[in-house]
Amino acid sequence: MPIDPSHLKERIRLGLREDTLTELKGVAKADYKVDGRDFAKEVSALANTEGGQIFLGIEDDGTISGIGTRDQADALIRQISQICQDTIRPAIVTTRCQVKVDEEYVLVVDVPSYSPNRPYSINGIFYIRDGSQSRPATGSELIRSLESVNFHFDEQPVRGSRLDDLDMHVFQSFCKTAYGRPCKQDEIHPYLKALKSITDDNIPTVTGILFFSRDPLRFLQDAR
């Protein structure tokens, strides 16, 4: 989920604070690492509620402390990927990007708002987002979370992506294999929509990015 640095700077200027959709985490004081269980709790709580974003490298008061050197940032990304795959049950796919603000880099983790796999748990505990806090869900809240699963993750639009991010040569190759001929120019959008690869607003979905993007890992870094 690439994020416009100018948009992030504006959010910070206006006062980036924690809320139901936003979590700030400084990592400089912890050798540019996250506490595995705490991070898993925040991710699962956001995923079980309305989704949201975790800003790594920004302190609770909005101060930008960064994510360290390139090697430290790479290690942090690997740690986050492992947490999402090994600690959260079931495993969850998040999108991430690094944004340079002034002289520091911030890592933004985007947690999906709806998924057929929710609710997510940590060692059998289901968390939800309550304001700026993540807490265990009550029985009724857990039931509501289960009842709200009416959205297929693979049909979710990938924020920050554009139609130009899809490789039409790859798509036409698919059409030749699947339909015996390439699509005509006026057929491309209808076919992509029929395949749930773009939304009605022509935004690529998870399916579209995985199947036809020039660089799927740019948007879905946990994809395998």
Image (cartoon, rainbow, N blue to C red):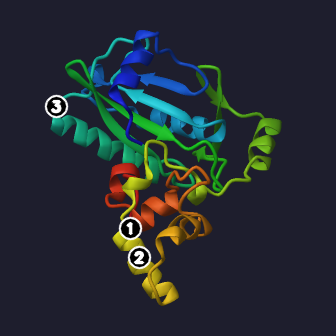
Q: CA distance from mark 1 to mark 3?
A: 36 Å
In this rendering, position of residue 84 left or right of residue 138? left
Res. 44 visible in picture: yes
- Under tag 2, what secondary structure? helix
Instruction: Kindly indicate whether the residue at mark 2 contacts the one at mark 1 (C-beta within 8 angstroms).
Output: yes
**For mark 1, what is the residue?**
168
Q: Quadrant of the C terminus?
A: bottom left
Amino acid type for the residue under numbered disc 1: Met
- Which numbered circle lies on residue 69? 3
The disc at residue 172 is 2
Does dot 1 land on a helix, a strand or a loop?
Answer: helix
SS class, disc 3: loop
Q: Residues within 10 Å of mark 1 (few under 14, many from 20)?
A: some
Q: Tell me if mark 3 has few (under 14), some (14-19) or many (20+) residues whose alpha carbon lies within 10 angstroms of its own.
A: few
Of pointers 1 and 3, the one earlier in the residue sequence: 3
In the depicted structure, whether residue 151 falls above or below residue 75:
below
Instruction: Tell me the mark number nearer the camera, choosing from 1 and 3.
Output: 1
State if disc 2 and disc 3 touch (CB < 8 Å). no
Q: Residue at x 41, y 16 (%)?
A: 10
Question: In the picture shown, does residue 170 fall above or below 38?
Answer: below
The residue lying at 54 percent from left, 58 percent from top is: 198
Task: Give, as a three-letter code, the residue at label 2.
Answer: Gln
Residue 59, given in percent of the width and then of the height, sits at 38, 16
In the image, what residue type sits under mark 3? Thr
Q: Whole-Å distance between the Cαs marked 3 and 2? A: 41 Å
